[in-house]
Image (spheres, grey):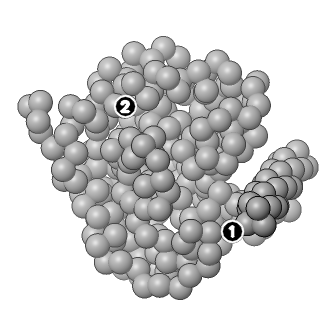
């Protein structure tokens, strides 16, 4: 590989490789040390084609979910069975792995820009911007970029577009599936919300058993299935269909409620502080 060789988005692969190695080493203990990541489906990863694969997952934090998937994908491809023991798998990482993320999130800081270089396909959300509800058209360039990434390799997407559980899936994912006809691999994660803060950067609690289940690719009739049918199939596959609310654990529900209370308290505290500053 030439030192200045680029991927389709103009990112230098040599830099991306070292970035993945570095970030992988410093994050490894978050899943194999401070906490324990239980994995199912390494054999599924090893049997996937080189490109046009779309991973569809539920979402619990901004970044910890994706970082864990980078670990699991590379460990699986290096021959490890449902394990990320020993970070040697990071020496030769798969470089054509991408993930869909909100553009405003990826521009917020130097750290998020570094994360973006590792493989972000930054898109503008059509329903939410800067904490406010909006209604705007999908940018065709965003759809095109996802297609470009699928043509080059693997893409991770979180079709709910939020870390809040049980929210409906966005229909844009079904449009992408029908348009580009990727192999769709469902991923179900758990324990990340209890382990990390909402951004997935700070360890909130240690000793948590995290879980990642990589399921077999879905059987989809790209030509004849409706958008609604595909969305429902995805909801069941990533265990976010409303029917799963009947079996949500009390522990998960209480943890989510506590997180919301803390977030509300912080927001009110910030508002009071801003109000005092204005008076001063």
Is 139 left, or right, of 192 in this rendering? left
Q: Residues within 10 Å of mark 1 (few under 14, many from 20)?
A: some
Which residue is pictured at 28% across the width and 44% down the height?
Answer: 96
Q: Position of residue 174 (x, y in %)?
A: 46, 73
Foreground of the two, 61 or 53: 61
Mark closest to the chain's N terminus, 2 or 1: 2
Q: Are marks 2 and 1 in contact (CB under 8 Å)?
A: no
User: How far across and how far down the image is residue 93, in percent?
Assistant: 32, 29
Q: Position of residue 34 (x, y in %)?
A: 68, 21
**Helix, strand or loop status at disc 2:** helix
* Residue under numbered circle 1: 167
**Can residue 78 be seen in the rendering of this structure?**
no
Q: In the current view of this chain or complex, which residue is farthest to the left?
A: 2
Secondary structure of residue under mark 1: loop
Quadrant of the rendered image containing residue 9? bottom left
Q: Quadrant of residue 236?
A: bottom right
Q: Nearer the viewer, residue 178 or 69?
A: 69
Residue in the foreground of this view, choosing between 18 and 244: 18
> Can the viewer see residue 9?
yes
Cα–Cα gap, marks 2 and 1: 31 Å
Q: Residue at the location (64% across, 18% down)?
A: 33
Mark drawn on residue 20: 2
Picture residue at 39% right of the left edge, 60% below the top: 122
């Amino acid at each position: 590989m030439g030192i200045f060789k680029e991927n389709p988005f103009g990112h230098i692969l040599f830099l991306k490789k070292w970035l993945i190695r570095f970030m992988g080493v410093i994050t490894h203990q978050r899943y194999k040390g401070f906490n324990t990541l239980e994995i199912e489906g390494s054999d599924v990863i090893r049997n996937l084609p080189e490109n046009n694969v779309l991973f569809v997952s539920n979402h619990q934090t901004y970044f910890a979910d994706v970082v864990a998937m980078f670990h699991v994908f590379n460990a699986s491809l290096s021959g490890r069975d449902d394990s990320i023991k020993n970070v040697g798998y990071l020496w030769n990482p798969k470089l054509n792995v991408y993930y869909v993320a909100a553009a405003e999130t990826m521009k917020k800081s130097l750290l998020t820009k570094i994360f973006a270089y590792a493989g972000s396909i930054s898109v503008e959300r059509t329903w939410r911007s800067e904490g406010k509800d909006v209604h705007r058209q999908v940018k065709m360039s965003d759809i095109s970029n996802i297609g470009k990434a699928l043509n080059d390799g693997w893409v991770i997407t979180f079709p709910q577009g939020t870390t809040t559980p049980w929210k409906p899936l966005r229909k844009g994912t079904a449009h992408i599936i029908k348009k580009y006809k990727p192999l769709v691999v469902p991923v179900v994660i758990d324990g990340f919300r209890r382990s990390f803060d909402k951004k997935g950067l700070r360890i909130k609690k240690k000793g948590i058993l995290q879980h990642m289940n990589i399921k077999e690719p879905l059987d989809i009739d790209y030509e004849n299935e409706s958008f609604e049918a595909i969305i429902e199939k995805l909801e069941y596959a990533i265990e976010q269909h409303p029917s799963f609310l009947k079996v949500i654990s009390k522990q998960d529900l209480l943890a989510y409620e506590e997180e919301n209370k803390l977030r509300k308290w912080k927001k009110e505290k910030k508002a009071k502080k801003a109000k005092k500053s204005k008076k001063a």
